[in-house]
Image (cartoon, grey):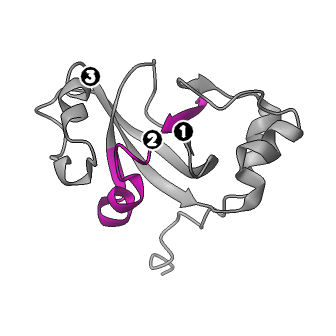
Amino acid sequence: MATWLMSANESVFNHALAFKEKGEIDWKQNRHYCVGDTVFIYCTKPSSRIRYMTKVITINQTLDDIDNDLRFWKKPELRTYSAKGKFFRIRMIAVSDDDGLIFAEIKDKKLLLYPPQSPQKLNDDLINYLMKFFKIGDERDDKETD
């Protein structure tokens, strides 16, 4: 499985509300993602930080397969452009607002030189750094203890 970093513009799409209400977002598929890949999301200005850790749960969806997410678009006219091509669905695993995830902090540690403009695969050093800030719960079902 691969680990990715991609950027999200909070002034175009309300990712926070979409994750809060649905827990998942359908996203334009512009790389060769695989089900199970981890995707960290960097929120652009004014946040300028990596905020979300997600998992890819479906790939190669068409517009007919995805959820109607128009209510989350702050600039609905941009959805028309985004509605072409294939989509993948990501599920939020964890969210963090730790200051260690601000771009300037990551850059100071020489783990990332520029804010991400397009999706990119991450190296082990950056993955290990990011994992310190995301608390991942136990995914097993504790109800099945009999």
- State which region is magenta: 1-25
- Residue underneath mark 2: 9
* Residue 141 drawn at (x, y percent): 47, 70
Residue at left offset 65%, top offset 32%: 115
Residue placed under numbered mark 1 in the picture = 39
Count residues near mark 3 (Cα–Cα under 10 Å), then give few for <14, some for 14-19, many for 20+.
some
**Comparing labels 3 and 2, the label whose residue is closer to the camera:** 2
User: Is residue 20 rendered to the left or right of residue 74?
Assistant: right
| Residue in the image at 43% along x and 48% along y | 10
For mark 1, give the secondary structure.
strand
Which residue lies most toward the left here?
Answer: 64
Specify the amino acid type for callout 2: Asn
The residue under the point 30% across, 60% down is 22
Mark toward the viewer: 1 or 2: 2
Would you call the spot at circle 2 few (<14 residues within 10 Å), some (14-19), or many (20 or more)?
A: some
Side (left or right) of 131 relative to 137: right
Q: Is residue 23 magenta?
A: yes
Give the residue type that dot 1 points to.
Answer: Val
Residue picked out by circle 3: 86
